[in-house]
Image (cartoon, rainbow, N blue to C red):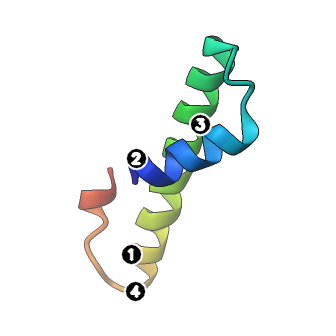
Amino acid sequence: MEEAVDLVVAARADLDDPQQVAELTARCEADTRALIAEACQRRGGDAAWAG
């Protein structure tokens, strides 16, 4: 998960702006975890590992 978040941040953030990098990292990780948890729940799986 961390590698995917890092890739998105590197592609979208101004890497010279530490605040923007931190905010985008947090938002991207939270959104990704929510999507994984939702997909697991729809398939009847355990989404606990996503959180």
Of the numbered discs 2 and 3, the one sitting upstream in the chain is 2
Between the C-alphas of marks 3 and 1, the distance is 20 Å
Quarter where residue 50 is shown: bottom left
Task: Give the structural element (helix, strand or loop) at label 3.
Answer: helix
Quarter in which the N terminus is drawn = bottom left
What residue is shown with label 3?
Answer: 27
Tags 3 and 4 in contact by the CB under 8 Å rule?
no
* 25 shown above or below 14: below
Mark 2 vs mark 3, foreground winner is 2
Between the C-alphas of marks 2 and 1, the distance is 19 Å
What residue is shown with label 2?
Answer: 2
Seen at 48% across and 68% down, the residue is 38
* 26 shown above or below 16: below
Task: Give the structural element (helix, strand or loop) at label 2.
Answer: helix
Q: Which mark is residue 40?
A: 1
Between the C-alphas of marks 3 and 4, the distance is 25 Å
Tags 1 and 4 in contact by the CB under 8 Å rule?
yes
Residues 10 and 26: in front is 10
Mark 2 vs mark 1, foreground winner is 2
Q: Left of 35 or right of it: where is 49?
A: left
Quarter where residue 17 is shown: top right
Task: Give the structural element (helix, strand or loop) at label 1.
Answer: helix
Residues 1 and 47: in front is 1
Seen at 53% across and 63% down, the residue is 35
Measured as percent of width and height from the top left, residue 26 is found at 52, 32
Q: What residue type is labelled 3?
A: Arg
Measured as percent of width and height from the top left, residue 24 is found at 63, 32
Q: Which amino acid does label 2 sit on?
A: Glu
Of the numbered discs 4 and 2, the one sitting upstream in the chain is 2
Numbered marks: total: 4
